[in-house]
Image: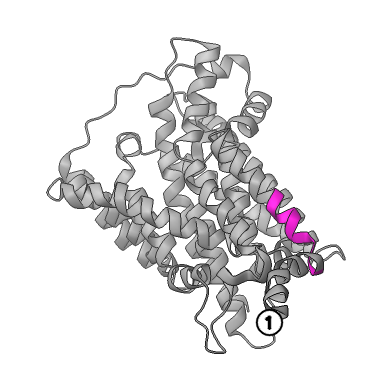
């Protein structure tokens, strides 16, 4: 009887020993509110918030490691099988590729430059993290800085992929101490993706004049042939894999998904990739990411630094895209509306919709959505390529 009562008391005792669990419950509920009530990135924030809650239940049964005759907890198994092997983020990229239409970019190839220019935020945040790591407030090294920098691309799966790879790289090297910030960087990335309609408009207004925002871009896209649509993913895989071999997993899965979509001969595979498979993986990935955030890992000064640097990276990426669009207007006879440069981040299609909404407010007859989709989908390719560059550079520098 006494042993039974002690077992019942274990949960309360665990909360008394680690009261920060309650704070993590509140954080989980806050993210759940954003996803459900505010409908911001619900597909990821709902499972991530529940993963955070599960990771901070008393005794941590769902995230325990195997040993002492007990199997690993359910969410720990998801992490081992799906995250440490990179399977989950790569399958998400397969689904993203199957859901993405690259035609706006192919019909106007110069928008690819805007997607590339927006990646400046990644490197600015990386340098910022290294500088912040030199202070006494946080302990960021090159591995953590790379994981934080990729937030600037506003691409959740890529952020998870890089964060996991950097953590594994640090753990495999002697005399290298690496922090587990996968969960914090992932939540930061998805949070800023959800906040695109709040973050970007003030920056766009600050950097553009009313005259520039009123620039009309006639939408008369060149027809993209079926042959071009099929050759594009194949050639992209080859070219980027030759130039940046470390980017081949992300680019390969992204372009495989797109090839399945555009070839037109495997509609069932396209449907499964875009819908059933992707939705299932999202649930598992969200739970696994949330489970990386038990209180003792998440509630540290470094977490605040991650969110601040992530915000700075996202803002810098937006600024870089707009400034590059303005530069293009100086050297080109065909003017582009500088606002579409803000869509160069990988937040598809949220960033493009922000540009469309702002254009409509200035001129109800100005339709910029399809023009903004060019740099928007180019940003997905750009962020995946930059991720490969970071992997190659960081590994050689350690």
Q: Is residue 1 above or below residue 194?
A: below
Is 381 situated left or right of 41 in this image?
left
Q: Is residue 36 visible?
A: yes
Q: Main secondary structure of the magenta part?
A: helix
Q: Residue at x 69, y 49 (%)?
A: 27
Q: Residue at x 43, y 72 (%)?
A: 81
Q: Is residue 149 located in the magenta-colored stretch of the structure? A: no
Which quarter of the picture shows residue 370?
top left
Is 394 situated left or right of 350 in this image?
right
How many neighbours does mark 1 have within 10 angstroms: few (below 14), some (14-19), or many (20 or more)?
A: few
Which quarter of the picture shows residue 132?
bottom right
Query: Whole-percent x and y of residue 291?
Result: 58, 63
Number of residue marks:
1
Q: Is residue 56 above or below residue 200?
A: below
Q: Residue at x 56, y 47 (%)?
A: 190
Q: Residue at x 48, y 23 (%)?
A: 356
Q: Is residue 23 located in the magenta-colored stretch of the structure? A: yes
Residue at the outermost left position: 265
Point out the image quarter for the N terminus.
bottom right
Query: Whole-percent x and y of residue 205?
Result: 65, 23
Closer to us: 270 or 207:
270
Closer to us: 43 or 18:
18
Q: Which residue is mark 1?
A: 176
Point out the image quarter for the C terminus.
bottom right
Q: Is residue 151 visible?
A: no
Q: Secondary structure at mark 1?
A: loop
- Residue range highlighted in magenta: 17-26
Query: Whole-percent x and y of residue 365?
Result: 43, 10
Is 317 situated left or right of 141 in this image?
left
Query: Whole-percent x and y of residue 12?
Result: 75, 65
Q: Is residue 331 above or below residue 153?
A: above
Which quarter of the picture shows residue 323?
top right
């Amino acid at each position: 009887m006494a042993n039974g009562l002690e077992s019942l008391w274990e949960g309360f005792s665990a909360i008394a020993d680690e009261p920060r669990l309650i704070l993590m419950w509140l954080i989980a509920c806050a993210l759940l509110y954003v996803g459900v009530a505010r409908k911001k990135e619900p597909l990821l924030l709902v499972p991530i918030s529940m993963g955070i809650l599960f990771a901070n239940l008393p005794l941590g049964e769902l995230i325990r490691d195997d040993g002492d005759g007990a199997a690993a907890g359910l969410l720990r198994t998801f992490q081992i099988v799906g995250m440490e092997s990179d399977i989950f983020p790569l399958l998400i990229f397969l689904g993203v590729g199957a859901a993405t239409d690259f035609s706006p970019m192919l019909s106007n190839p110069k928008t690819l430059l805007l997607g590339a220019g927006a990646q400046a935020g990644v490197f600015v945040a990386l340098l910022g993290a290294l500088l912040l790591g030199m202070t006494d407030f946080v302990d960021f090294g090159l591995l953590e800085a790379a994981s934080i920098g990729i937030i600037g691309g506003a691409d959740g799966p890529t952020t998870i992929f890089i964060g996991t790879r950097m953590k594994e790289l640090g753990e495999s090297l002697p005399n290298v101490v690496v922090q587990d910030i996968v969960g914090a960087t992932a939540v930061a990335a998805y949070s800023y993706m959800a906040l695109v309609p709040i973050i970007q408009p003030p920056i766009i207004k600050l950097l553009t004049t009313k005259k520039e925002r009123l620039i009309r871009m006639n939408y008369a896209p060149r027809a993209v042939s079926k042959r071009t649509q099929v050759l594009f993913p194949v050639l992209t895989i080859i070219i980027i894999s030759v130039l940046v071999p470390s980017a081949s997993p992300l680019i390969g899965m992204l372009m495989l998904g797109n090839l399945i979509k555009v070839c037109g001969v495997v509609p069932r595979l396209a449907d499964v990739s875009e819908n059933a498979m992707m939705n299932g993986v999202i649930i598992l990935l969200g739970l696994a990411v949330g489970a990386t955030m038990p209180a003792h890992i998440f509630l540290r000064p470094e977490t605040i630094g991650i969110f601040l640097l992530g915000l700075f990276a996202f803002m810098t990426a937006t600024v870089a895209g707009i400034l590059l669009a303005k530069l293009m207007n100086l050297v080109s006879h065909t003017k582009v509306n500088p606002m579409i440069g803000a869509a160069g981040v990988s937040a598809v299609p949220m960033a493009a919709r922000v540009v469309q909404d702002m254009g409509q407010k200035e001129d109800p007859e100005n339709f910029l959505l399809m023009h903004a989709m060019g740099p928007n989908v180019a940003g997905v390719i750009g962020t995946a390529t930059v991720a490969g560059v970071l992997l190659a550079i960081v590994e050689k520098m350690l």
